Image: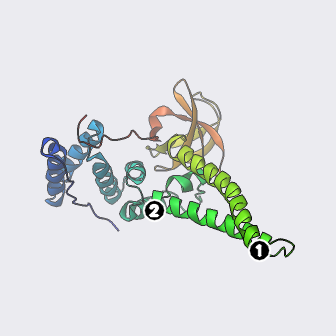
Amino acid sequence: MFRVILLSCMFSATAATPAQVLDRADRLYLQGRRQEAMEQWERMVAKKDVCSPLAEYNLGTAYLKQGDRGKAVLHLLRATLLFDGDRDTATNLAVARSRVLGPGRSGNKTWYQDLREVSSDKLCISMLCLAWLFSLIAGLAHAIDFKKKIAGSIFKSLCLGLVPALVFNTALLFATVYAKHGVVTGVVMERRTMLQSEPVDDSGKILNLVQGEELEIIGEKDDFLKVSVPGGPSGYVKKTMVEKVFPVPTWPQDGRK
C-alpha cells in the first residue's frame, strides 16, 4: 500500500510550527508539487523536530513511489524504529525490501533485524507468556511428584519457575535493546556499488551490491566502511556509497530543538 499520510499532531500553542510545516508539505504533495513537499520533509528531518518521524515516513513512501529504492528503505527503516509497531510503515518497508533484491539474490534477515522491528507491546506480551510458560512447566513437574504435598509443591515450583523466566526475559530485553540501538546499519544508496576484499580502490570484488540493500557496519578505515551482508560475506565498501541508518537520534517530544 502506497500513501502519504496526513496526520495532525497535538502540540501546545508554543510548539505548533512543526505541525504547520508538516501540513503544508502534505498539501503540496497532494497538489502535485511533490519536489517542494519532499524538500520540506527533508528539512524537517534535518532539524529533528517533533514531527520528523512523520516526515521520515512520508519521504520513504514518496521515494518508494518514485522508484528510488535506496532512499525509500533508508527513511522507512528510520520510521519503523520511531513509529513503534506502526502497520503502515511496516507494510511499506516490506514492499520496498521486496523491490531491492532480484531473482538472483535472496535476502536473509539476521536476528537483530527481526528483534529491531518488534513493537514494544508484542515484546511485553512475549515476555509475559514466557514467564507463565516457565512457571506452568515447573508447577506441573512438581505437582506430579506425589511424595510431596501438591499445594505446597505447586507454590514452590511456581516461584522456582520464575527464576529461569526472569533470566531468559532479561536476556531477551538486553538483546532487543542492543538490536535497536547497538547495531549500526547502513543502506546502499548508489546503483553501482561493490563489496571489496580490501579497503583500497583496486582490490578484488567480492560481490555486487544492490541499491537499497541493508548492511551491518562493523568498522571504518580511511575512505571505506567494513560491512557485513546479512547471511553473506564481509568486506569493504566506499563511504560515499552507503548511508547509516541506526542508531537514529531520539527526537525531542516537545517540538523544541
The disc placed on residue 241 is none
Q: Residue 194, located in which quarter of the rendered image?
A: top right
Amino acid carrying mark 2 in the image? Ala
| Residue 36: % across, % down | 18, 47
Left or right of 97 on screen, residue 165: right
Q: Secondary structure at mark 1?
A: helix
Amino acid carrying mark 1 in the image? Ile
* Residue occupying the point 69% across, 64% down: 158
| Residue 52: % across, % down | 29, 46
The residue under label 2 is: 94
* Residue occupying the point 63% across, 38% down: 235
| Residue 239: % across, % down | 48, 33
The residue under label 1 is: 150
Mark sitting earlier along the chain (2/1): 2
Above or below, 223 against 31 in this view is: above
88 or 192: nearer the eye?
A: 88
